[in-house]
């Protein structure tokens, strides 16, 4: 199946959103961007990828500074990047990279407020992947080597950080159904089945095949 859509994947921690997005890109034959965006941002800025990795998808603590300098509207031009905290610098660079790529190609992108960044594009399908907390906690134990006794707390903390990050940069509520075209509960689905459902959605809503 060929694809003429950009697909953004927003996901709860442990819901399998990354793996679903990766498989989806392979099935559709289009590029996949997640942590790859950190490397691209590092190359564009000269900042170490390791430094950016520490700031990835974390909200800046510079809200008052950001508001006072008029940089709260990230979609309308960027300035004084050297003065910004690392979190803001990474967001701005990823924002620019995502938009630049949207002008040239279709792709699958995970996280990073991509659904908001590309809100004015007609060829975007916005997907939110979620799952029951117990399933996500178990996956965190299996995949991330997190102690079982603190898995639920760890999962909830990551989700809170993602929600704060999304709210800070977009002004919208993370996970609110009205912000997405498709909300997918992956609790009882394999990665393959979840990818199949998204592909079915693309076919139903008129993607070229």
Image (spheres, rainbow, N blue to C red):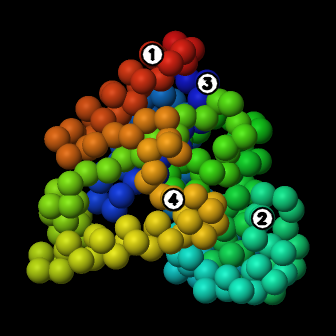
Please report the residue visible at 77 percent of the width from the left and 38 percent of the height from the top: 103
Residue 65 to residue 43: above or below: below
Instruction: Give the CA distance from mark 3 to mark 1.
Output: 14 Å
Please report the residue visible at 67 percent of the width from the left and 45 percent of the height from the top: 118
Q: Is residue 186 left or right of residue 8?
A: left
Please report the residue visible at 18 percent of the width from the left and 80 percent of the height from the top: 150
Instruction: Give the CA distance from mark 4 to mark 1.
Output: 27 Å
Instruction: Give the CA distance from mark 3 to mark 4.
Output: 28 Å
Circles 3, 1 touching at the beta carbon (< 8 Å):
no
> Could you say which quadrant of the image residue 152 lies in?
bottom left
Q: Is residue 208 left or right of residue 203?
A: right
Q: Residues within 10 Å of mark 2 (few under 14, many from 20)?
A: few
> Mark 1 = which residue?
204
Q: Residues within 10 Å of mark 4 (few under 14, many from 20)?
A: some
Instruction: Give the CA distance from mark 2 to mark 4.
Output: 16 Å
What number is the disc on residue 4?
3
Tell me the SS state at disc 4: loop
Circles 2, 3 touching at the beta carbon (< 8 Å):
no
> Mark 4 = which residue?
173
Residue 154 visible within the image: yes
Tell me the SS state at disc 3: loop
Disc 3 vs disc 4: which is toward the camera? 4
N-terminal label among 2 and 3: 3
Instruction: Give the CA distance from mark 2 to mark 1.
Output: 35 Å
Please report the residue visible at 68 percent of the width from the left and 31 percent of the height from the top: 122
Tell me the SS state at disc 2: loop
């Amino acid at each position: 199946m060929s694809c003429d859509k950009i697909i953004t994947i927003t996901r709860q921690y442990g819901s399998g959103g990354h793996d679903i997005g990766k498989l989806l890109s392979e099935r559709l034959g289009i590029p996949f961007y997640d942590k790859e965006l950190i490397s691209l941002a590092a190359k564009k800025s000269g900042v170490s990828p390791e430094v950016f990795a520490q700031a990835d998808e974390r909200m800046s603590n510079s809200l008052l500074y950001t508001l006072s300098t008029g940089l709260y509207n990230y979609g309308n031009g960027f300035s004084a990047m050297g003065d910004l905290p690392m979190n803001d610098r990474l967001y701005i660079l990823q924002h620019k990279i995502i938009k630049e790529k949207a002008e040239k190609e279709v792709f699958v992108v995970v996280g990073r407020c991509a659904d908001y960044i590309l809100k004015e594009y007609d060829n975007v399908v916005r997907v939110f992947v979620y799952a029951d907390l117990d399933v996500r906690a178990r996956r965190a134990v299996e995949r991330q080597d997190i102690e079982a006794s603190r898995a639920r707390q760890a999962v909830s903390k990551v989700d809170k950080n993602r929600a704060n990050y999304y709210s800070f940069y977009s002004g919208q509520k993370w996970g609110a159904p009205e912000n997405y075209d498709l909300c997918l509960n992956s609790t009882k689905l394999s990665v393959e089945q979840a990818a199949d459902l998204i592909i079915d959605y693309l076919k139903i809503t008129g993607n070229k095949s």
